[in-house]
Image (tube, rainbow, N blue to C red):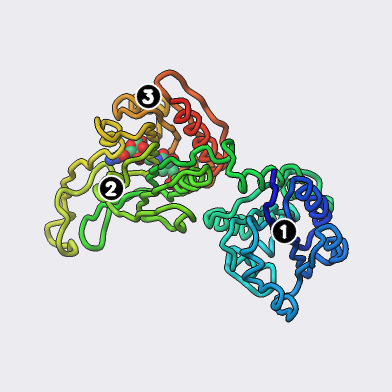
Amino acid sequence: MLVGKRILLIIGGGIAAYKALDLIRRLQDRGARVRAILTRAGTEFVTPLSVGSLTGDKVFQELFSLTDENDMGHIELSRDADLLVVAPATADLMAKMANGHANDLASTALLATDKRVLLAPAMNVRMWLNPATQRNLVTLRADGVAVVGPNDGSMACGEFGPGRMAEVPEIIAAIEALINGSAAGRPLTGRHVVVTSGPTREAIDPVRYISNHSSGKQGHAIARAAAAAGAAVTLVTGPVALPDPAGVTTVHVESARQMLAAVEAALPADIAVFAAAVADWRVAEIAGGKIKKGAGGPPTLAFVENPDILATIARRTAGRPGLVVGFAAETDDVLGNARAKLTRKGCDLIVANDVAAGTGTFGGDSNLVHIVTSDGLETWERQSKDAVAEALVSLLARRITAS
Ligand code: PMT
């Protein structure tokens, strides 16, 4: 139920705007109070009169409206709500949000709010699949914006595929999960989760280093999913080109030794997930100046082993996190090597993935993982790294709750 909760509904310009009318009714049935902002494009699909008759309130439309500013400024409008819901969220609204534009009432309210935002995207299939929209989606998710849908289906434009706005009951369920922080929606409330992500860099001299292809996408997705599940999250990340996830404490490091120190400083934790691709070796001595080409030929580098962060934490006798999760990045015998790592490193669960050339696991947006434990093996279908993260977090939440 949503008794007494205040929802600011932003209705964008799309054929799915008609569903927003039903959404208002269903929210009111659950006890919510709904205020609406109708964009100019939205008025092409539903009228202010129909929206206002349902909300029983003024329909807010203009950024610069003397009466509205006297009654309630746009900043206050955006904060006098428990949740902002954008339905339908058009490609244009998503682009404005992802880039921080504020040139109309809807985008200004979205930029000014201090509340959570839920998007129900609806648009043509090609617009949804366009790299620009997908880029904006990644940015918005990283900013902590929640998204429901879109669903697959035939569209008003005659095409078939993802782009149909989620159905009203699905949007209501997403709203209830966000607002109520229900046990089902936020099972990690009160827990601390530490996640490592990205590559490490091991300096050779002041200008060169050894590293790997990890982009941080998988580790950052896990940090976001854990935060969405209610956990306090510390993300320890090597150098990546991703924004820090919203609502997550992010610690930036370069080398394996810095990563270990940051993880140890972040403890105690209930769960630790080691998704970073840590360099196994570093050069024994970092040259003080740039190594020059010379008559002696190429330099010979001597290596020493880096500390194993996962094994160090998993083998702690005092202050070991309740659940220690490692990854295994393998190019051959994925399962055999993953099982060996589970035992050798002393962790509770290994997420194994194939990183051979051509798999796209490093840097890509999807992943095919195997969940390896001492008593079993599960193989999950290839899915987005966000979906892997969400499934992993709910598996860990079930395990930690049962323990
Ligand atoms: O970042 P992306 O581009 O999204 O790619 C995701 C990923 C491929 C990096 C990720 O899914 C993954 O597999 N991460 C683990 C990479 C790795 O270093 O695997 P490994 O098999 O070499 O190491 C096994 C485990 O020990 C890992 O949990 C690793 O974090 C940990 N380890 C390894 C060496 C070390 N010195 N310290 C560690 O903690």
The mark found on residue 265 in the picture is 2
Q: Nearer the viewer, residue 284 or 71?
A: 71
Residue behind mark 3: 339
The residue drawn where x is 43% and y is 40% is 191
Which mark lies nearer to you, 3 or 2?
2
How far apart marks 1 and 3 lie (CA) works out to: 49 Å
Q: Amino acid at mark 3?
A: Arg
Q: Amino acid at mark 1?
A: Leu
Q: Within the image, what quadrant is residue 291 found in? A: bottom left
The residue drawn where x is 69% and y is 71% is 105
- Do callouts 3 and 2 mark residues in contact (Cβ within 8 Å)? no
Q: Residue furthest left?
A: 296
**Label 1: which secondary element:** strand
Residue 147 in picture, x, y percent from top left: 63, 50
Q: Quadrant of the N terminus?
A: top right
The tag earlier along the polypeptide, 1 or 3, is 1
Q: Nearer the viewer, residue 387 or 305?
A: 387
The residue drawn where x is 78% and y is 63% is 13
Residue 83 in picture, x, y percent from top left: 64, 55
Res 108 seen here: yes
Query: In the shown orientation, is residue 146 left or right of residue 126?
Result: left
Residue behind mark 1: 9
Res 357 seen here: no
